[in-house]
Image: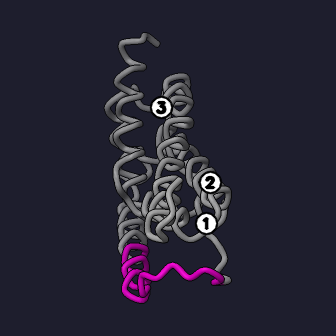
Amino acid sequence: MSLAMILPMSAFALASSISPGPVNLVCLASGTRYPISQGLIFATGATLGFIVLFVAVGLGLYSVLAVVPGFTQALRWAGVAFLLYLSFRLVQDDGRLAEGEARKAPGFVAGALMQWANPKAWLASASGIGAYTRGADLEEVVIFAALYLPICWLSLGSWVYAGAFLRQYIRGRRF
């Protein structure tokens, strides 16, 4: 694969990974509420969950979606339910950052599973595979996934760090 393809693939991976979405917002919230290390565990799970989804779509899962329309509808409703759940949690939140609150941070498995219900992840996978590979070409899919892996992790990690910065700023402390 030439550098002429690797650069646009990388730019696509960056644009789709760093742009706001449900997983990015959970990373931001994790940075504001929990230690950075716990937010990065979630980001790692989300990154690896996305890479598995991306490879699955690249190796033919997308064609299964075209053949089995009920599966597409089920994924759509799962995405709607997930976004409603996030909306409900947002409405319930009072916006305060409690010092000694004993809530458990979202972990690795939550991050990985969240990507499979994330409409943005499905759209990024399908459009990236469609635009930059020849379908089920294993070598191209693996190269694209290998590019996506560090870019996605660094993008999600930057949201965690942005949350930590906001936490310090809100509490009146500077880095």
Residue 70 percent location from the top left of the image: 38, 67
Using the numbered discs, state the Cα–Cα distance from disc 2 to disc 1 in whole angstroms. 12 Å
Does residue 139 lie above or below 33 as drawn? above
Q: Secondary structure at mark 1?
A: helix
**In the visual, does 109 lie left or right of 162?**
right
Q: Secondary structure at mark 3?
A: loop
Question: Element at badge 2?
Answer: helix
Q: Residue 162, image x and y in percent?
A: 46, 54
Q: Is residue 125 magenta?
A: no
Q: Earlier in the sequence, mark 3 or mark 2?
A: 2
Q: Is residue 17 above or below residue 86?
A: above
Instruction: Please state which of residues 88 and 137 is positioned toward the viewer in this rendering.
Output: 88
Q: Which residue is mark 3?
A: 136
For discs 3 and 2, the disc positioned in front in the rendered view: 2
Mark pair 3, 2: CA separation: 31 Å
Question: From the viewer's perspective, is the residue at label 3 or at label 1 nearer?
Answer: 1
Mark 2 is on which residue type?
A: Leu
The image shows residue 133 at horizontal and vertical percentages of: 40, 27
Give the residues in magenta. 82-101
Residue that badge 2 annotates: 40
- The residue that label 1 is drawn on is 110
Kind of residue indicated by mark 1? Ala
What x and y, as percent, mark residue 121?
Answer: 42, 52
